[in-house]
Amino acid sequence: MKVLKFGGTSVGSVESILSLKRIVEREAQRQPVVVVVSALGGITDQLLSTAQLALSGNETWKDSFDNMVERHHQLIDSVITDNIKHSELYHKVDTLFEQLHSIYFGVFLIHDLSHKTEDTIVSYGERLSSHIVATLVENARWIDARTFIKTERKHNKHVLDSTLTQQLVRDAFSHQHTITLVPGFISQDKDTHETTNLGRGGSDYTASIIAAALDADILEIWTDVNGFMTADPKVIKAAYTIHELSYIEAMELCNFGAKVVYPPTIYPVCVKNIPIQVKNTFDPDGEGTIIKAKIKNDGKPIKGISSIKGTTLINVAGLSMVGVIGVNRRIFTALANHGISVFMVSQASSENSTSIGVREQDADAAVAVLNDEFAKEIETGAMFPMEAQSGLATIAIVGENMRHLPGIAAKLFETLGRSGISVIAFAQGSSETNISVVIEAAYLRKALNVLHDSFFLSEYKVLNLFICGIGTVGGKLIEQIRSQYDELKEHSRLKLNVVGIASSKHAIYNRDGLDLQTYREELQASELSSPQKLCEAVIGMNIFNSVFVDCTASGEIAALYQPLLEHNISVVAANKIAASSPYDEYMRLKQTAVTRGVKFRYETNVGAGLPIIGTINDLRNSGDKILKIEAVLSGTLNFIFNELTADVPFSETVHRAKEEGYSEPDPRIDLSGKDVIRKLVILTREAGYKAEQEEVEKHLFVPDEYFEGSVDEFWKRLPQLDDDFEKRRRTLEQQGERWRFVASMEHGKMKVGLQAVAQSHPFYNLEGSNNIVLLTTERYKAYPMQIQGYGAGADVTAAGVFANIMSIANI
Ligand SMILES: Nc1ncnc2c1ncn2[C@@H]1O[C@H](COP(=O)(O)OP(=O)(O)O)[C@@H](O)[C@H]1O
Ligand SMILES: N[C@@H](CC(=O)OP(=O)(O)O)C(=O)O
């Protein structure tokens, strides 16, 4: 025979409950089955919260109550079509609801909610759901679990009396019936006959107890996911099903928070060597997970990762502890006597402190118990009063193959460290099937994600992007990401998840990825943002593998790189401000990136999509030395000088550069050489020299006074330069030469200026807005290396930014 347990997720909706019916009736054709059901998903919580409302005198407990009635009625109306069955069931359900109403009303009237009353209230969830399922499934008999699941009171808690229960279960099932329906979770005190329960999630335990007592062939746990997975799929999108788990591995994972199976469930069936199968009600033919004693060795060191959010660490410390035998015994005995369980212990080898991990709800009691136990030692000063640190989370990585395999703990620490997550306590049992670490709870999601990424070969690598700036470059980048998304996912196994987009005024975020078609409307409708708010939000989301992409020209945004890098967020900048800022600031950014193990990339700062910075880095990394750089680095200026003819005056060429989207928003940044100076400084630094903007020698072609005042004034005055330019242009034409605005660096000395180049010069034929760079190095001396191509334009710049992002994905 088989025992099948269906959780709240499997009786919560019409779809799931009809699937349950099919699964059970199909199985019953082969062998007798016992079906254990939980309350409708969410009802247990609602029963408890309604009780709290009634207790506090809040009249809305009635609305919440009505809502529960309505939900059960609706479910019955949708799935029970037979009129007689329908009215019989309504009668049963409404009788239960009448009782429940009276209890709530009593709580409301006398403002009192004892544990006993609360346990009674919460039992209605399973009592209601099991009647619905028993009516829905053909030929099912219903038995009340309270007649055979018996508890006794120990340390103020209800614990199972397993000997009595086993006997009663056998008696209750002595006459075999094809389908028997049992409400999970609920039990009865063997002495007082009060209604009790087996703890939250306890229906799994009910099913396991029955399976063990009846020597079932298998225990099946039916839920809403495809079996036991490498991590909680609600937190880790890349989690996948573990097809086989040993009892020990399953126990470790469940003890550390894998809610899919309630921890006490495993022991009764493990002792009897009964396998547990975890399956998905919404995908009944899926393979799911089998948990048993002996499993195939798949060679993987880690099977799964689980976590407990509400962790408190209690530090038991004092000088008297050193070498004293019995302190640990006293700690554990005292806690056990008060029914407080410790799920993690970490002791330094000096033995003067022991950290114990308890659940947040047990923390106050644990501190009181330990202060009491060691009251004498604390009074004499030999021990310190207990210190509790809350707001923590525990993560466990579990796998039997971890045993004797070196390097697992190192990898765990390394992975967390690279993401800026510190380990507060660490524990590894001598069985070596579990390594646990305690971290700040705020970092839990991020930690789980990076650990999953590092220990499991996920189907996809995920990069989470925050894109700042949706102008020409940012807009194009988003377009490119959108059109490449499927291709990258399919062929490179990379998911580029855009989790944040900011314009100059607004910002939107979504951990699961924003819609790249509608983001502009979403931004419009969103709240006002600011660079400071943006920074806080990006850091606050605390997302793993994240990259901040700056497609603005804003100094305020560039100022965010330092805090972002410090929080282990990589930065890709099209914005040149940071890389050309004072040398010390630039170095600080680079060093922060190195120490934090993240990337700071800004290839498009020079030559848009051309591989200039990367090439210089490659040359230097391979031992070459950059001796000289000669370059035309302004696509805008090159465009202007190429457009200049007898018919097109200078001022018109500047207008055209703006219209074509080549120039900076304020074209004076290009005309003043400022943009080229910044680029030259960046290249010089990449070439290995300490360079500052002020050190660049300038030979400009627009008089200084044009750079004062507003942009409007500038546009008005610009035509005054046309005649002089035309005169100089004609002379140049006669000499067979062309103007190029050249940036050069030789042994660290930098220069920019307008230069007339003859036909034989490699710069002479530089078309349109193209850029060119000549690199003279120790290896490329007689014939410098030449890089040439589009040096401006939204498409190529966005593509360069995209390439930088891909280099961080490292695929
Ligand atoms: N390692 C894991 N594998 C599968 N599910 C997990 C794991 N860890 C946590 N879970 C969570 O457990 C949930 C199932 O447990 P629960 O909500 O109690 O379901 P049920 O109501 O069916 O008992 C899943 O939806 C999933 O979010
Ligand atoms: N209904 C109870 C018992 C239970 O086991 O539920 P589920 O199977 O939905 O986790 C609870 O919510 O705690």
Image: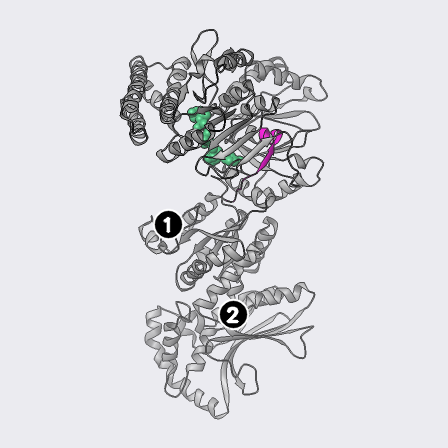
Closest to the observer, 186 or 670: 186
Q: In the displayed structure, would residue 634 be above or below residue 166?
A: below
Q: Position of residue 168 (x, y in %)?
A: 50, 12
Q: Position of residue 607 (x, y in %)?
A: 51, 70
Q: Amino acid at mark 1?
A: Ser
Name which residue lies at 65% across and 22% down.
318
Q: In the displayed structure, would residue 246 be above or below residue 172?
A: below
Q: Residue furthest top?
A: 191
The residues bearing labels 2 and 1 have C-alpha atoms spaced at a distance of: 31 Å
Closest to the observer, 522 or 203: 203
Q: Amino acid at mark 2?
A: Gly
Whichever of labels 2 and 1 marks the residue nearer the N terminus, that label is 1
Name which residue lies at 69% across and 29% down.
430
Q: Is residue 396 visible?
A: yes
Instruction: Specify the quadrant that holds the C terminus.
Output: bottom right
Q: Is residue 441 visible?
A: no
Residue labelled with disc 1: 529
Magenta segment range?
238-252
Q: In the displayed structure, would residue 46 be above or below residue 243?
A: above
Residue labelled with disc 2: 607
Q: In the displayed structure, would residue 224 be above or below residue 788?
A: above
Q: Is residue 366 left or right of residue 6?
A: right
Name which residue lies at 51% across and 59% down.
578
- Is 79 contained in the magenta span? no
- Is 239 contained in the magenta span? yes
